[in-house]
Amino acid sequence: MAYAKITAMLLESLETHCFRNTSGKISWGPNLNIIYGDNGQGKTNWLEAIYLLATTKSFRTQRLQEAVCFGEELAIVRGRVACAQEVHRDLQVAVQSGTKTLIVNSKREAVTRYLGQLDAIAFTADELEVVRGAPDARRRFLDRGILSLHHIYVQTLADYNRVIKQKNRLLQDASNAEQSAADVLPLITPWNEQLISLGSQIHHARAGYVTRLNEVLERRLFGREEVTIRYVSSLEGKGDLSDYESLLAERLRLRLPAEIAAGYALVGPHRDDLGILFDGHEIRTYGSSGQQRSALITLDLAAISLYYSWRREYPLFLIDDIDAELDGKRIEHLLKHLEGRTQTFITTSKESLVKQYLTRANVYEVKEGLVAEARLLTNKSMSLVTEA
Amino acid sequence: MLEYAEPVIKLIDEFKRLPGIGHKSAQRLAFHVLRMSETDVERFIAALQEVKRRIVSCSICNNLTDVDPCRFCSSPGRDRSVICVVEEPYNLVAVEKTRSYKGLYHVLHGSISPIRGMNVEDLRLANLLPRLKPENNEGVEVREVILATNPNTEGEATANYIKHLLKPLGLRVTRIAMGMPVGSDLEYVDEVTMDKALTNRHEI
Ligand SMILES: [Zn+2]
Protein backbone atom coordinates (compact mmCIF):
# COMPACT_ATOMS: atom_id res chain seq x y z
CA MET A 1 0.00 0.00 0.00
CA ALA A 2 2.97 2.31 0.49
CA TYR A 3 4.33 4.08 -2.52
CA ALA A 4 7.66 5.83 -2.77
CA LYS A 5 7.81 9.14 -1.00
CA ILE A 6 9.56 11.93 -2.83
CA THR A 7 10.83 13.72 0.23
CA ALA A 8 13.35 12.77 2.84
CA MET A 9 11.89 13.52 6.26
CA LEU A 10 10.08 10.46 7.52
CA LEU A 11 9.02 9.25 10.93
CA GLU A 12 9.53 5.50 10.70
CA SER A 13 8.48 4.51 14.17
CA LEU A 14 7.44 5.97 17.47
CA GLU A 15 7.75 4.54 20.95
CA THR A 16 6.26 6.04 24.07
CA HIS A 17 6.64 5.32 27.73
CA CYS A 18 4.19 6.82 30.24
CA PHE A 19 3.33 9.67 27.90
CA ARG A 20 -0.26 10.39 28.99
CA ASN A 21 -2.03 7.03 28.67
CA THR A 22 0.15 5.74 25.84
CA SER A 23 2.87 3.12 26.07
CA GLY A 24 4.14 1.04 23.19
CA LYS A 25 5.62 1.22 19.72
CA ILE A 26 4.14 1.97 16.32
CA SER A 27 5.72 1.69 12.86
CA TRP A 28 4.26 4.32 10.56
CA GLY A 29 3.55 4.35 6.86
CA PRO A 30 5.28 6.91 4.64
CA ASN A 31 2.10 8.61 3.43
CA LEU A 32 -1.29 8.72 5.11
CA ASN A 33 -1.62 7.31 8.63
CA ILE A 34 -5.06 7.11 10.20
CA ILE A 35 -5.34 6.76 13.96
CA TYR A 36 -8.82 5.48 14.61
CA GLY A 37 -10.74 4.87 17.81
CA ASP A 38 -13.62 5.94 20.00
CA ASN A 39 -13.37 9.25 21.81
CA GLY A 40 -11.40 9.20 25.04
CA GLN A 41 -9.20 6.25 24.01
CA GLY A 42 -6.07 8.33 23.49
CA LYS A 43 -5.87 8.98 19.73
CA THR A 44 -4.81 12.57 20.22
CA ASN A 45 -2.14 11.49 22.73
CA TRP A 46 -0.28 9.70 19.93
CA LEU A 47 -0.54 12.77 17.74
CA GLU A 48 0.71 14.92 20.60
CA ALA A 49 3.66 12.53 21.08
CA ILE A 50 4.63 12.92 17.41
CA TYR A 51 4.35 16.69 17.70
CA LEU A 52 6.47 16.69 20.86
CA LEU A 53 9.18 14.61 19.19
CA ALA A 54 9.22 16.97 16.20
CA THR A 55 9.00 20.36 17.92
CA THR A 56 9.83 19.64 21.61
CA LYS A 57 6.47 21.25 22.44
CA SER A 58 2.92 20.10 22.98
CA PHE A 59 0.03 21.56 21.00
CA ARG A 60 -2.18 21.14 24.07
CA THR A 61 -0.30 22.45 27.06
CA GLN A 62 2.51 24.80 28.03
CA ARG A 63 3.24 22.65 31.11
CA LEU A 64 4.69 19.43 29.77
CA GLN A 65 4.63 17.78 33.19
CA GLU A 66 0.86 17.38 32.67
CA ALA A 67 1.68 14.92 29.90
CA VAL A 68 3.46 12.52 32.23
CA CYS A 69 1.19 9.57 33.03
CA PHE A 70 -0.43 9.94 36.45
CA GLY A 71 1.67 8.43 39.23
CA GLU A 72 4.83 8.31 37.09
CA GLU A 73 7.85 10.62 37.18
CA LEU A 74 9.27 10.19 33.72
CA ALA A 75 7.69 10.20 30.28
CA ILE A 76 9.67 9.23 27.20
CA VAL A 77 8.86 9.69 23.53
CA ARG A 78 11.34 8.13 21.16
CA GLY A 79 11.29 7.94 17.40
CA ARG A 80 13.32 6.71 14.48
CA VAL A 81 13.59 9.24 11.70
CA ALA A 82 14.85 8.76 8.16
CA CYS A 83 16.57 12.05 7.31
CA ALA A 84 17.79 10.77 3.95
CA GLN A 85 17.68 7.44 2.18
CA GLU A 86 20.42 5.95 4.30
CA VAL A 87 20.61 8.33 7.23
CA HIS A 88 18.54 7.33 10.22
CA ARG A 89 18.46 9.13 13.52
CA ASP A 90 17.01 8.15 16.87
CA LEU A 91 15.37 11.13 18.55
CA GLN A 92 14.16 11.16 22.11
CA VAL A 93 12.35 13.67 24.30
CA ALA A 94 12.17 12.83 27.99
CA VAL A 95 10.01 14.81 30.39
CA GLN A 96 10.78 14.71 34.10
CA SER A 97 9.99 17.19 36.90
CA GLY A 98 8.83 19.75 34.36
CA THR A 99 12.10 19.76 32.40
CA LYS A 100 12.80 18.04 29.13
CA THR A 101 15.91 16.32 27.92
CA LEU A 102 16.58 16.12 24.19
CA ILE A 103 18.61 13.27 22.79
CA VAL A 104 19.82 12.54 19.27
CA ASN A 105 21.47 9.18 18.68
CA SER A 106 22.00 8.66 22.43
CA LYS A 107 23.69 12.05 22.82
CA ARG A 108 22.16 14.99 24.65
CA GLU A 109 21.60 18.04 22.47
CA ALA A 110 20.70 21.70 22.99
CA VAL A 111 17.30 22.70 21.64
CA THR A 112 18.76 24.78 18.79
CA ARG A 113 20.65 21.71 17.57
CA TYR A 114 17.80 19.29 18.19
CA LEU A 115 15.25 21.20 16.12
CA GLY A 116 15.18 20.59 12.39
CA GLN A 117 15.78 16.83 12.45
CA LEU A 118 12.02 16.43 12.30
CA ASP A 119 9.32 19.05 11.91
CA ALA A 120 5.56 19.03 12.16
CA ILE A 121 2.62 21.28 11.49
CA ALA A 122 -0.54 20.46 13.43
CA PHE A 123 -4.15 21.28 12.65
CA THR A 124 -6.06 20.95 15.90
CA ALA A 125 -9.12 22.42 17.60
CA ASP A 126 -6.76 24.65 19.60
CA GLU A 127 -5.17 25.93 16.43
CA LEU A 128 -8.54 27.31 15.35
CA GLU A 129 -7.71 30.14 17.75
CA VAL A 130 -5.55 31.43 14.89
CA VAL A 131 -8.65 32.25 12.83
CA ARG A 132 -11.10 33.02 15.61
CA GLY A 133 -9.15 33.96 18.74
CA ALA A 134 -7.01 36.78 20.09
CA PRO A 135 -3.90 38.18 18.32
CA ASP A 136 -1.46 36.14 20.45
CA ALA A 137 -2.62 32.92 18.72
CA ARG A 138 -1.81 34.51 15.35
CA ARG A 139 1.58 35.76 16.55
CA ARG A 140 2.34 32.22 17.74
CA PHE A 141 1.33 30.86 14.32
CA LEU A 142 3.83 33.19 12.64
CA ASP A 143 6.56 32.52 15.20
CA ARG A 144 6.15 28.74 14.80
CA GLY A 145 6.50 29.10 11.04
CA ILE A 146 9.60 31.28 11.26
CA LEU A 147 11.11 28.94 13.84
CA SER A 148 10.74 25.97 11.53
CA LEU A 149 12.82 27.84 8.93
CA HIS A 150 15.31 29.58 11.25
CA HIS A 151 15.97 27.77 14.52
CA ILE A 152 18.04 30.69 15.72
CA TYR A 153 14.77 32.61 16.09
CA VAL A 154 14.17 30.58 19.29
CA GLN A 155 16.81 32.69 21.01
CA THR A 156 15.53 36.00 19.63
CA LEU A 157 12.02 35.26 20.90
CA ALA A 158 13.20 34.02 24.29
CA ASP A 159 15.40 37.11 24.77
CA TYR A 160 12.61 39.45 23.69
CA ASN A 161 10.12 37.84 26.09
CA ARG A 162 12.67 38.03 28.88
CA VAL A 163 13.28 41.73 28.20
CA ILE A 164 9.51 42.41 28.23
CA LYS A 165 9.16 40.52 31.52
CA GLN A 166 11.99 42.52 33.13
CA LYS A 167 10.66 45.79 31.76
CA ASN A 168 7.12 45.00 32.99
CA ARG A 169 8.45 44.51 36.51
CA LEU A 170 10.23 47.89 36.40
CA LEU A 171 7.10 49.58 35.02
CA GLN A 172 4.89 47.93 37.62
CA ASP A 173 7.17 49.10 40.45
CA ALA A 174 7.34 52.60 38.92
CA SER A 175 3.57 52.67 38.56
CA ASN A 176 3.04 51.65 42.20
CA ALA A 177 5.55 54.25 43.40
CA GLU A 178 4.07 56.88 41.03
CA GLN A 179 7.52 57.69 39.68
CA SER A 180 8.04 60.25 36.92
CA ALA A 181 9.24 59.35 33.43
CA ALA A 182 12.48 61.24 34.09
CA ASP A 183 13.21 59.06 37.13
CA VAL A 184 12.40 55.83 35.32
CA LEU A 185 14.22 56.63 32.06
CA PRO A 186 17.77 55.64 33.13
CA LEU A 187 16.50 52.31 34.49
CA ILE A 188 14.28 51.53 31.50
CA THR A 189 16.80 52.53 28.81
CA PRO A 190 19.07 49.46 29.23
CA TRP A 191 16.02 47.26 28.52
CA ASN A 192 14.51 49.45 25.79
CA GLU A 193 17.79 49.32 23.87
CA GLN A 194 17.53 45.53 23.73
CA LEU A 195 13.80 45.74 23.02
CA ILE A 196 14.54 47.91 19.98
CA SER A 197 17.15 45.57 18.57
CA LEU A 198 15.29 42.31 19.30
CA GLY A 199 11.89 43.82 18.44
CA SER A 200 13.18 44.95 15.04
CA GLN A 201 14.49 41.46 14.33
CA ILE A 202 11.09 40.00 15.21
CA HIS A 203 9.20 42.60 13.16
CA HIS A 204 11.33 41.97 10.07
CA ALA A 205 11.17 38.19 10.49
CA ARG A 206 7.37 38.19 10.78
CA ALA A 207 6.70 40.76 8.05
CA GLY A 208 9.05 38.86 5.72
CA TYR A 209 7.42 35.53 6.58
CA VAL A 210 3.96 36.93 5.83
CA THR A 211 5.18 38.28 2.48
CA ARG A 212 6.55 34.87 1.50
CA LEU A 213 3.45 33.11 2.84
CA ASN A 214 1.30 35.36 0.65
CA GLU A 215 3.33 34.36 -2.39
CA VAL A 216 2.57 30.66 -1.95
CA LEU A 217 -0.97 30.98 -0.59
CA GLU A 218 -3.50 29.07 -2.72
CA ARG A 219 -6.16 31.71 -2.31
CA ARG A 220 -9.11 29.76 -3.65
CA LEU A 221 -8.27 26.27 -2.48
CA PHE A 222 -11.73 25.59 -1.06
CA GLY A 223 -14.05 27.65 -3.18
CA ARG A 224 -14.75 31.03 -4.65
CA GLU A 225 -13.78 33.17 -1.68
CA GLU A 226 -10.25 34.53 -1.67
CA VAL A 227 -7.97 34.33 1.37
CA THR A 228 -5.43 37.10 1.88
CA ILE A 229 -3.17 37.86 4.81
CA ARG A 230 -1.34 40.93 6.02
CA TYR A 231 1.07 41.59 8.89
CA VAL A 232 -0.44 44.31 11.07
CA SER A 233 2.22 46.13 13.06
CA SER A 234 0.96 47.89 16.18
CA LEU A 235 3.01 50.88 14.99
CA GLU A 236 0.99 51.20 11.78
CA GLY A 237 -0.11 54.79 11.23
CA LYS A 238 2.40 56.05 13.81
CA GLY A 239 5.15 56.91 11.34
CA ASP A 240 7.52 55.51 8.76
CA LEU A 241 7.39 51.70 9.11
CA SER A 242 10.17 51.24 6.55
CA ASP A 243 12.60 52.53 9.20
CA TYR A 244 11.12 50.32 11.91
CA GLU A 245 14.02 50.58 14.33
CA SER A 246 13.88 54.39 14.51
CA LEU A 247 10.09 54.38 14.69
CA LEU A 248 10.14 51.87 17.55
CA ALA A 249 12.73 53.94 19.44
CA GLU A 250 10.65 57.08 18.92
CA ARG A 251 7.42 55.41 20.09
CA LEU A 252 9.14 53.97 23.19
CA ARG A 253 10.36 57.45 24.07
CA LEU A 254 6.95 59.06 23.56
CA ARG A 255 4.94 56.37 25.31
CA LEU A 256 7.04 55.98 28.45
CA PRO A 257 4.64 58.03 30.64
CA ALA A 258 1.72 55.93 29.37
CA GLU A 259 3.68 52.72 30.00
CA ILE A 260 4.39 53.83 33.59
CA ALA A 261 0.71 54.63 34.10
CA ALA A 262 -0.30 51.22 32.72
CA GLY A 263 2.40 49.35 34.59
CA TYR A 264 3.39 47.21 31.61
CA ALA A 265 5.01 47.43 28.17
CA LEU A 266 2.69 48.97 25.56
CA VAL A 267 5.06 49.30 22.61
CA GLY A 268 6.65 46.55 20.56
CA PRO A 269 5.90 43.56 18.31
CA HIS A 270 4.26 41.71 21.23
CA ARG A 271 1.24 43.89 20.35
CA ASP A 272 1.19 43.05 16.62
CA ASP A 273 -1.33 40.96 14.74
CA LEU A 274 -1.85 39.01 11.55
CA GLY A 275 -4.82 40.11 9.46
CA ILE A 276 -6.60 37.18 7.81
CA LEU A 277 -9.19 38.26 5.25
CA PHE A 278 -11.81 36.25 3.37
CA ASP A 279 -12.91 38.19 0.30
CA GLY A 280 -11.68 41.31 2.03
CA HIS A 281 -13.49 40.69 5.33
CA GLU A 282 -11.85 39.95 8.66
CA ILE A 283 -12.29 36.19 9.05
CA ARG A 284 -12.38 36.25 12.85
CA THR A 285 -15.46 38.49 12.90
CA TYR A 286 -17.24 37.80 9.63
CA GLY A 287 -16.24 34.25 8.65
CA SER A 288 -18.51 31.26 9.17
CA SER A 289 -16.96 28.41 11.09
CA GLY A 290 -16.51 26.49 7.82
CA GLN A 291 -14.77 29.48 6.23
CA GLN A 292 -12.54 29.85 9.29
CA ARG A 293 -11.48 26.20 9.02
CA SER A 294 -10.84 26.54 5.28
CA ALA A 295 -8.74 29.63 5.86
CA LEU A 296 -6.68 27.89 8.54
CA ILE A 297 -6.05 24.86 6.33
CA THR A 298 -5.07 27.21 3.50
CA LEU A 299 -2.60 28.93 5.84
CA ASP A 300 -1.19 25.63 7.07
CA LEU A 301 -0.70 24.40 3.51
CA ALA A 302 1.05 27.65 2.64
CA ALA A 303 3.33 27.18 5.65
CA ILE A 304 4.06 23.67 4.39
CA SER A 305 4.95 24.80 0.87
CA LEU A 306 7.10 27.60 2.24
CA TYR A 307 8.87 25.08 4.41
CA TYR A 308 9.41 22.91 1.35
CA SER A 309 10.72 25.73 -0.84
CA TRP A 310 13.14 26.66 1.92
CA ARG A 311 14.37 23.26 3.07
CA ARG A 312 13.55 21.02 0.09
CA GLU A 313 11.62 18.59 2.26
CA TYR A 314 8.16 18.46 3.76
CA PRO A 315 7.33 18.58 7.47
CA LEU A 316 4.92 16.05 8.95
CA PHE A 317 1.30 17.20 8.90
CA LEU A 318 -0.96 16.27 11.81
CA ILE A 319 -4.73 16.69 11.82
CA ASP A 320 -6.59 15.98 15.03
CA ASP A 321 -10.20 14.79 14.89
CA ILE A 322 -10.39 15.45 11.17
CA ASP A 323 -14.11 14.75 10.67
CA ALA A 324 -15.11 17.03 13.54
CA GLU A 325 -13.12 19.86 11.98
CA LEU A 326 -13.79 19.37 8.28
CA ASP A 327 -16.60 18.07 6.08
CA GLY A 328 -16.08 15.14 3.69
CA LYS A 329 -15.48 17.36 0.67
CA ARG A 330 -12.80 19.39 2.40
CA ILE A 331 -11.14 16.25 3.77
CA GLU A 332 -10.98 14.70 0.29
CA HIS A 333 -9.61 17.93 -1.15
CA LEU A 334 -7.01 18.30 1.56
CA LEU A 335 -5.78 14.69 1.53
CA LYS A 336 -5.48 14.81 -2.24
CA HIS A 337 -3.38 17.94 -1.94
CA LEU A 338 -1.09 16.30 0.62
CA GLU A 339 -0.69 13.02 -1.28
CA GLY A 340 2.90 12.42 -2.31
CA ARG A 341 4.02 15.42 -0.26
CA THR A 342 3.77 15.11 3.48
CA GLN A 343 3.77 12.15 5.78
CA THR A 344 0.32 12.77 7.24
CA PHE A 345 -1.21 11.64 10.53
CA ILE A 346 -4.91 12.05 11.17
CA THR A 347 -7.19 10.96 13.98
CA THR A 348 -10.84 10.06 13.56
CA SER A 349 -13.63 8.26 15.35
CA LYS A 350 -15.54 7.60 12.12
CA GLU A 351 -15.40 4.10 10.74
CA SER A 352 -16.79 5.26 7.38
CA LEU A 353 -13.76 7.51 6.92
CA VAL A 354 -11.41 4.64 7.70
CA LYS A 355 -13.16 2.46 5.11
CA GLN A 356 -13.00 5.19 2.51
CA TYR A 357 -9.23 5.64 2.79
CA LEU A 358 -8.24 2.11 3.72
CA THR A 359 -6.53 1.38 0.43
CA ARG A 360 -4.23 4.37 0.56
CA ALA A 361 -3.54 4.57 4.27
CA ASN A 362 -2.03 2.75 7.20
CA VAL A 363 -4.74 2.44 9.80
CA TYR A 364 -4.14 2.05 13.54
CA GLU A 365 -6.83 1.44 16.08
CA VAL A 366 -6.35 2.90 19.56
CA LYS A 367 -7.94 1.32 22.64
CA GLU A 368 -7.09 2.71 26.08
CA GLY A 369 -3.88 4.23 24.75
CA LEU A 370 -2.64 1.02 23.19
CA VAL A 371 -2.49 0.57 19.47
CA ALA A 372 -3.24 -2.24 17.15
CA GLU A 373 -2.65 -1.97 13.44
CA ALA A 374 -5.70 -2.51 11.32
CA ARG A 375 -5.18 -3.85 7.83
CA LEU A 376 -7.51 -4.46 4.97
CA LEU A 377 -7.49 -8.19 4.50
CA THR A 378 -10.54 -8.79 2.36
CA ASN A 379 -12.50 -6.34 0.32
CA LYS A 380 -14.61 -4.61 2.92
CA SER A 381 -13.82 -6.18 6.24
CA MET A 382 -11.26 -5.00 8.72
CA SER A 383 -9.30 -7.35 10.83
CA LEU A 384 -7.10 -6.38 13.71
CA VAL A 385 -3.54 -7.57 13.86
CA THR A 386 -1.71 -6.72 17.04
CA GLU A 387 1.54 -4.90 16.52
CA ALA A 388 4.55 -6.94 17.58
CA MET B 1 6.13 13.22 63.64
CA LEU B 2 9.40 14.24 61.94
CA GLU B 3 10.87 11.79 59.47
CA TYR B 4 14.40 12.01 60.95
CA ALA B 5 15.93 13.02 64.28
CA GLU B 6 16.01 16.78 64.81
CA PRO B 7 19.79 17.31 64.24
CA VAL B 8 19.59 15.44 60.94
CA ILE B 9 16.68 17.57 59.78
CA LYS B 10 18.55 20.74 60.76
CA LEU B 11 21.53 19.63 58.65
CA ILE B 12 19.32 18.72 55.66
CA ASP B 13 17.67 22.15 55.86
CA GLU B 14 21.07 23.86 55.87
CA PHE B 15 22.19 21.96 52.78
CA LYS B 16 18.92 22.85 51.07
CA ARG B 17 19.78 26.55 51.46
CA LEU B 18 22.76 26.05 49.12
CA PRO B 19 22.25 26.89 45.44
CA GLY B 20 21.43 23.94 43.21
CA ILE B 21 20.72 21.57 46.12
CA GLY B 22 17.24 20.05 46.25
CA HIS B 23 15.73 17.87 48.94
CA LYS B 24 17.13 14.59 47.62
CA SER B 25 20.70 15.89 47.29
CA ALA B 26 20.51 17.54 50.71
CA GLN B 27 19.42 14.22 52.20
CA ARG B 28 22.30 12.41 50.48
CA LEU B 29 24.84 14.97 51.70
CA ALA B 30 23.52 14.85 55.26
CA PHE B 31 23.85 11.06 55.39
CA HIS B 32 27.32 11.33 53.94
CA VAL B 33 28.26 13.66 56.80
CA LEU B 34 26.91 11.08 59.28
CA ARG B 35 29.31 8.53 57.82
CA MET B 36 32.31 10.90 57.91
CA SER B 37 34.97 10.54 60.61
CA GLU B 38 35.18 13.17 63.35
CA THR B 39 38.47 14.55 61.93
CA ASP B 40 37.00 14.93 58.46
CA VAL B 41 34.04 16.84 59.85
CA GLU B 42 36.34 19.13 61.86
CA ARG B 43 38.50 19.82 58.81
CA PHE B 44 35.35 20.70 56.86
CA ILE B 45 34.11 23.08 59.57
CA ALA B 46 37.54 24.71 59.81
CA ALA B 47 37.61 25.28 56.03
CA LEU B 48 34.18 26.97 56.16
CA GLN B 49 35.19 29.20 59.07
CA GLU B 50 38.53 30.11 57.59
CA VAL B 51 37.07 31.16 54.28
CA LYS B 52 34.61 33.45 56.06
CA ARG B 53 37.31 34.89 58.36
CA ARG B 54 40.07 35.43 55.82
CA ILE B 55 38.30 36.24 52.56
CA VAL B 56 37.12 39.81 52.22
CA SER B 57 36.11 41.84 49.22
CA CYS B 58 38.76 44.20 47.83
CA SER B 59 37.96 47.78 48.77
CA ILE B 60 38.98 48.96 45.28
CA CYS B 61 37.60 46.37 42.83
CA ASN B 62 35.26 44.15 44.98
CA ASN B 63 37.15 41.00 44.01
CA LEU B 64 37.30 38.32 46.70
CA THR B 65 40.74 38.31 48.30
CA ASP B 66 42.70 37.42 51.41
CA VAL B 67 44.67 40.70 51.25
CA ASP B 68 43.16 44.16 50.77
CA PRO B 69 43.75 45.67 48.21
CA CYS B 70 43.79 42.48 46.19
CA ARG B 71 46.75 41.15 44.21
CA PHE B 72 45.53 42.74 40.99
CA CYS B 73 44.89 46.18 42.45
CA SER B 74 48.26 46.27 44.25
CA SER B 75 50.38 44.74 41.49
CA PRO B 76 52.85 47.17 39.87
CA GLY B 77 52.82 44.98 36.74
CA ARG B 78 49.19 45.65 35.81
CA ASP B 79 48.06 48.31 33.34
CA ARG B 80 46.09 50.73 35.50
CA SER B 81 44.61 52.56 32.50
CA VAL B 82 42.18 49.75 31.64
CA ILE B 83 39.39 48.34 33.81
CA CYS B 84 37.45 45.21 32.89
CA VAL B 85 33.98 45.02 34.47
CA VAL B 86 32.70 41.49 35.25
CA GLU B 87 29.64 40.13 37.05
CA GLU B 88 31.19 37.56 39.37
CA PRO B 89 34.66 36.70 40.71
CA TYR B 90 34.67 33.51 38.64
CA ASN B 91 34.16 35.60 35.48
CA LEU B 92 37.35 37.44 36.45
CA VAL B 93 39.15 34.10 36.66
CA ALA B 94 37.93 33.27 33.15
CA VAL B 95 39.31 36.54 31.72
CA GLU B 96 42.55 36.08 33.66
CA LYS B 97 43.04 32.60 32.19
CA THR B 98 43.51 34.16 28.75
CA ARG B 99 46.82 35.60 30.07
CA SER B 100 46.46 38.34 27.47
CA TYR B 101 44.65 40.86 29.66
CA LYS B 102 46.97 42.91 31.88
CA GLY B 103 44.59 45.57 33.17
CA LEU B 104 42.54 45.91 36.36
CA TYR B 105 39.09 44.57 37.21
CA HIS B 106 35.82 45.64 38.72
CA VAL B 107 33.47 42.98 40.10
CA LEU B 108 29.76 43.87 40.26
CA HIS B 109 28.62 40.77 42.19
CA GLY B 110 25.55 40.35 40.00
CA SER B 111 23.62 41.79 37.08
CA ILE B 112 20.44 43.84 36.82
CA SER B 113 17.35 41.65 37.02
CA PRO B 114 14.18 43.35 38.33
CA ILE B 115 12.22 40.08 38.34
CA ARG B 116 14.79 38.59 40.71
CA GLY B 117 14.84 41.73 42.83
CA MET B 118 18.32 42.74 41.60
CA ASN B 119 18.21 46.43 40.83
CA VAL B 120 20.80 48.99 39.86
CA GLU B 121 21.46 49.92 43.49
CA ASP B 122 22.25 46.29 44.34
CA LEU B 123 25.23 46.24 41.94
CA ARG B 124 28.62 47.03 43.53
CA LEU B 125 28.99 50.06 41.28
CA ALA B 126 29.39 52.93 43.73
CA ASN B 127 33.18 52.54 43.93
CA LEU B 128 33.68 52.41 40.14
CA LEU B 129 33.32 56.12 39.30
CA PRO B 130 35.82 57.36 41.97
CA ARG B 131 38.40 54.87 40.62
CA LEU B 132 38.40 56.61 37.26
CA LYS B 133 40.03 59.74 38.70
CA PRO B 134 43.87 59.72 38.48
CA GLU B 135 44.20 60.85 42.12
CA ASN B 136 42.46 57.62 43.20
CA ASN B 137 44.37 55.46 40.71
CA GLU B 138 48.03 56.10 41.63
CA GLY B 139 48.08 59.07 39.27
CA VAL B 140 47.14 57.03 36.20
CA GLU B 141 44.25 58.15 34.00
CA VAL B 142 41.80 55.40 33.01
CA ARG B 143 41.53 55.30 29.19
CA GLU B 144 39.16 52.41 28.70
CA VAL B 145 36.50 50.43 30.52
CA ILE B 146 35.72 47.00 29.04
CA LEU B 147 32.24 45.69 29.82
CA ALA B 148 32.56 41.92 30.10
CA THR B 149 29.19 41.11 31.63
CA ASN B 150 27.46 37.90 30.48
CA PRO B 151 25.99 37.67 26.96
CA ASN B 152 22.38 37.31 28.17
CA THR B 153 19.62 39.93 28.49
CA GLU B 154 20.55 40.75 32.12
CA GLY B 155 24.26 41.09 31.33
CA GLU B 156 23.40 43.19 28.31
CA ALA B 157 21.14 45.50 30.37
CA THR B 158 23.90 45.87 32.96
CA ALA B 159 26.44 46.77 30.26
CA ASN B 160 23.97 49.24 28.70
CA TYR B 161 23.38 50.91 32.07
CA ILE B 162 27.09 51.33 32.81
CA LYS B 163 27.71 52.54 29.25
CA HIS B 164 25.27 55.42 29.80
CA LEU B 165 26.89 56.16 33.14
CA LEU B 166 30.41 56.37 31.71
CA LYS B 167 29.89 57.82 28.23
CA PRO B 168 29.59 61.47 29.45
CA LEU B 169 33.05 61.13 31.06
CA GLY B 170 34.65 60.91 27.62
CA LEU B 171 36.60 57.70 28.12
CA ARG B 172 36.50 54.69 25.83
CA VAL B 173 33.79 52.17 26.74
CA THR B 174 33.87 48.80 24.96
CA ARG B 175 31.79 45.63 25.07
CA ILE B 176 33.41 42.24 24.60
CA ALA B 177 32.55 40.59 21.29
CA MET B 178 30.28 37.57 21.49
CA GLY B 179 31.37 34.85 19.19
CA MET B 180 33.19 31.69 18.47
CA PRO B 181 34.89 29.73 21.18
CA VAL B 182 38.42 29.39 19.82
CA GLY B 183 39.94 25.95 19.50
CA SER B 184 36.62 24.23 18.96
CA ASP B 185 35.52 22.77 15.67
CA LEU B 186 33.06 24.91 13.74
CA GLU B 187 30.81 21.89 13.70
CA TYR B 188 30.38 21.90 17.44
CA VAL B 189 29.49 25.56 17.76
CA ASP B 190 25.77 26.07 18.39
CA GLU B 191 23.79 28.14 15.91
CA VAL B 192 23.26 31.07 18.26
CA THR B 193 26.97 31.49 18.85
CA MET B 194 27.68 31.00 15.17
CA ASP B 195 25.13 33.67 14.28
CA LYS B 196 26.64 36.14 16.74
CA ALA B 197 30.11 35.33 15.48
CA LEU B 198 28.99 36.08 11.92
CA THR B 199 27.26 39.31 12.94
CA ASN B 200 30.26 40.54 14.93
CA ARG B 201 32.81 39.54 12.28
CA HIS B 202 35.69 41.93 11.63
CA GLU B 203 38.09 42.62 8.80
CA ILE B 204 41.53 41.02 8.86
ZN1 LIG C 1 41.12 44.66 43.86
Image: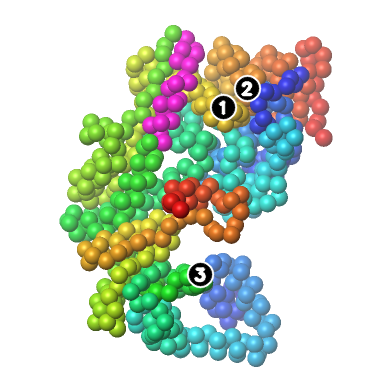
Q: Which quarter of the picture shows residue A13?
A: top right
Looking at this view, is B27 or B89 the one in front?
A: B89
Circle 1 is placed at which residue position? A308
In the depicted structure, whether residue A98 falls above or below residue A328 = below
Circle 3 is placed at which residue position? B98
> Colour scheme of this structure image?
rainbow
Dot label at residue A341: 2
Amino acid found under the numbered disc labelled 1: Tyr
At a point 60% along the width and 90% down the height, the residue shown is B42
Is residue B11 in sight in this rendering? yes
Label 2 crowd (10 A; few <14 / some 14-19 / many >=20): many
Circle 3: element type: loop
Looking at this view, is A296 or B25 the one in front?
A: A296
Circles 2 and 1, Cβ within 8 Å, touching? The answer is yes
Q: Residue B123: image x %, image y %?
A: 34, 69
Q: Residue B176: image x %, image y %?
A: 41, 60
Looking at this view, is A374 or A221 the one in front?
A: A221
Q: Residue furthest top?
A: A224
What is the CA distance from the residue labelled 2 to the residue labelled 3?
52 Å
What is the CA distance from the residue labelled 1 to the residue labelled 3?
45 Å
